[in-house]
Image: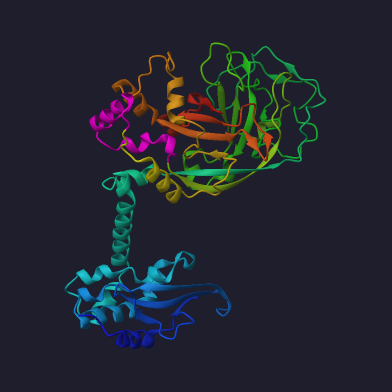
Amino acid sequence: MSVDPDRLLELFRRHLPLREGSVELAFASGYDAPVWRNEAGYPVVALRLTTFEPVDGVIPLDVREQEVFIGDDREHAPERWLAYVEGHLRAMPAILAHFGEPDAMLPCDLFGYGAVLADEALQRADDFAAALRDPVRLAVMDEAAREAEWRERLEPLGLADHVDEVRAMARASIRLHLSRSDELDEDDDDDAEVDDGEGDDEEGDDGDDAGADKDDDDDGDDAGATHEPGQTRLGGAPDLPRDLPWPEVDGVLLTFVAQFDLAELAGRPAARELPAHGLLSFFYAPIPPDGVRGHPVRVLHFTDLDALARRPVPPGVERLSAYDIDVADERLYPCVDSYFFYESLLPEARVLAVHRQRQRGEGGELVPFNPLAYFIAESGELDDHERPYHRLLGHPASIQGDPYLDVEIDTRPQGWDGWDDGSPEALAIRRRALRWRLLLQIDATERDELLLNQDGGFFYFWIPADALAVHDWSQARGALQCH
């Protein structure tokens, strides 16, 4: 038996409008009858949630109106269901306070606690009101609702039983937005020399020494520079200890890419994996030396900012255009090309069987592509969905193929030789690829300008997860994806 809409309307009229702090719940405007039954026969109430300026409490800052489904009253005795609705309205101040941030609320969110109807011990309005004022009980229902929502979202992927594992794949990231720096892009007028590589390394990296750019008559500052040493930026000339040889790998002088003042990043979710202080600097080889697989890189952590000075770029070393960097927080899931993250949650025998099926040209999907792409697009929290994609930590964007697999293959002596997709060996390599963590991704282009010496792709700085945990920057590796 269903409830008479007039009785439900009268019940709402007794409690609305309702005010808690700077938030008011009331009937939505423009409805002659704000309570009715929809085509499916369910009771619906048109509600308005208004957020006011918290100081004067008069100026409205935001108004949100919705037609809210209250629940299926036909599943319960009318008097008990009305007691539930009345108890819900009596407890509404506690529910509003439970949500905390009004920006996150919609009218429908406030009526998402119908789970209390399953508790047969609750019969009277007072019973329901007491239950819905209990913050612990509200938190339990919130988590149950999130779990049910995630199971529903993951059902098309065949991963409904892996909610926790999928949610754990999301990684915090720091999105980098570049703006042209007023630092001079031209090389210094000062002559720069390359020493014999015998200088001492006084910072806390892996200790490799190499040819350095030094000038005994100059403090190494970049002529015309507008930045203090140790500030976050991309390109231009780096800040280095005066007696540190210019970063190199196997005799190849590297190009300065970017440096980050870690104290400025401290407190951001992604920065928890980085040291809290110092300067983290990135160098790379635009073109790999002959016989070298992958792009040599160095990642250096300098702890004493007072010991740093601007260093001119040595002759013959590419100097990137100088950019200032603004940062924003993101939260990312592995991209579609890294589908193996999701497949790895399934039994290995099942995964291998499908990979062999693909190898025979018979197709087959463990995690359907289109639903996966939709899930990633809807679940990730991106600061901006458009390129360029410059980011620190998180998951990489890709041009073609799985970036994680690319860097893992680069560590094999034989590279891609002998790769047999669908084989147990290939599956093992893919599983090992999951150990890599993205340190830095730089997009090749910035506002139609070629930023790096590559063909419109991405350059990645990688590090194994165990090395990142102990800040062993000597384990960093470089990789490139381009068109």
Look at the picture and state if 349 lies above or below 275: above
Residue in the image at 66% along x and 33% along y: 451
Residue in the image at 57% along x and 11% along y: 290
**Residue 483 relative to residue 122: left or right:** right
Q: Quadrant of residue 483?
A: top right
Look at the picture and state if 317 lies above or below 46: above
> Residue 346 lies in magenta, yes or no?
yes
Instruction: Estimate the x, y position of residue 146 in percent, counting from the top left.
Output: 33, 57
Residue furthest right as drawn:
189
Look at the picture and state if 86 lies above or below 480: below
Q: How is the image coloured?
A: rainbow
Residue 53: tell me if it is visible.
no
**Residue 74 relative to residue 456: left or right:** left
Question: In the picture, which quadrant includes the N terminus?
Answer: bottom left
Q: Quadrant of residue 464?
A: top left
Q: Quadrant of residue 188?
A: top right
Q: Depth check: 269 or 457 in front?
A: 457
Residue in the image at 31% along x and 60% along y: 145
Instruction: Estimate the x, y position of residue 15 in percent, counting from the top left.
Output: 38, 85
Q: Depth check: 41 or 58 in front?
A: 41
Residue in the image at 27% along x and 28% along y: 352
Instruction: Estimate the x, y position of residue 229 in percent, counting from the top left.
Output: 69, 36
Q: Depth check: 327 or 407 in front?
A: 407
The number of discs equals 0
Residue 145: tell me if it is visible.
yes
Please provide the residue range marked out in magenta.
334-363
> Residue 295 lies in magenta, yes or no?
no
Residue furthest front as drawn:
362
Instruction: Estimate the x, y position of residue 192 in percent, counting from the top left.
Output: 76, 20
- Majority secondary structure in the magenta region: helix
